[in-house]
Amino acid sequence: MQSSSLAQVAYDPRRSILQVEFRDGTTYQYANVPVETYQDLLQADSKGAYFNRYVRSIFCHAPLRAAPVASK
């Protein structure tokens, strides 16, 4: 995926769940996301900007995996 903040996105149309993995390794699932929002995200010139404006604070979400902790 061409994005400085998003590593991968996946969508489950049956459950309307958008799964987003960020570049730092953190993964979240966003609930009740319309398929059109997912398609628009994929088509956006700036996927990170689209995500921040139309997904991040709009849809309920839950973490799946936290970012790895850097070892010293």
Image (spheres, grey):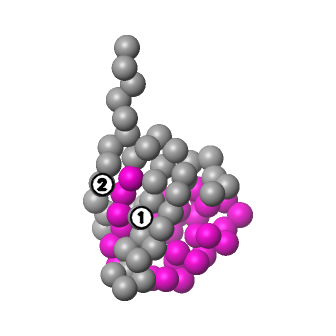
Q: Is residue 20 magenta?
A: no
- Secondary structure of the residue carrying tag 1 is strand
Look at the image and tell me in which quarter the C terminus lies.
Answer: top left
The image position of residue 45, as x and y in percent, is 71, 64
Cβ atoms under marks 1 and 2 closer than 8 Å: yes
The image position of residue 37, as x and y in percent, is 52, 77
Where 1 sits versus 44, above or below? above
Circle 2 sits on which residue? 64
| Residue 59 appears anywhere in the view | no
Q: Quadrant of residue 20?
A: bottom left
Q: Identify the amino acid type marked 1.
A: Gln
Q: Which mark is drawn over residue 52?
A: none
Q: Identify the amino acid type marked 2.
A: Leu
* Magenta stretch in the rendered image: 27-55
The image position of residue 32, as x and y in percent, is 35, 79
Q: At 37% across and 85% down in the image, what residue appears?
A: 14
Is 35 placed left or right of 1 in the picture?
left
Is 45 placed left or right of 27 in the picture?
right
Q: At 67% across and 55% down in the image, what residue appears?
A: 2
Label 2 CA crowd tier, 10 Å (few <14, some 14–19, many 20+): few
* Gap in angstroms between the C-alphas marked 1 and 2: 9 Å
Residue positioned most to the top: 72
Q: Quadrant of residue 12?
A: bottom left
Where 72 sits versus 14, above or below? above
Look at the image and tell me in which quarter the N terminus lies.
Answer: bottom right
Q: Is residue 54 magenta?
A: yes
Circle 1 sits on which residue? 19
Of 4 and 49, the residue lying toward us: 4
Is 6 placed left or right of 59 in the picture?
right
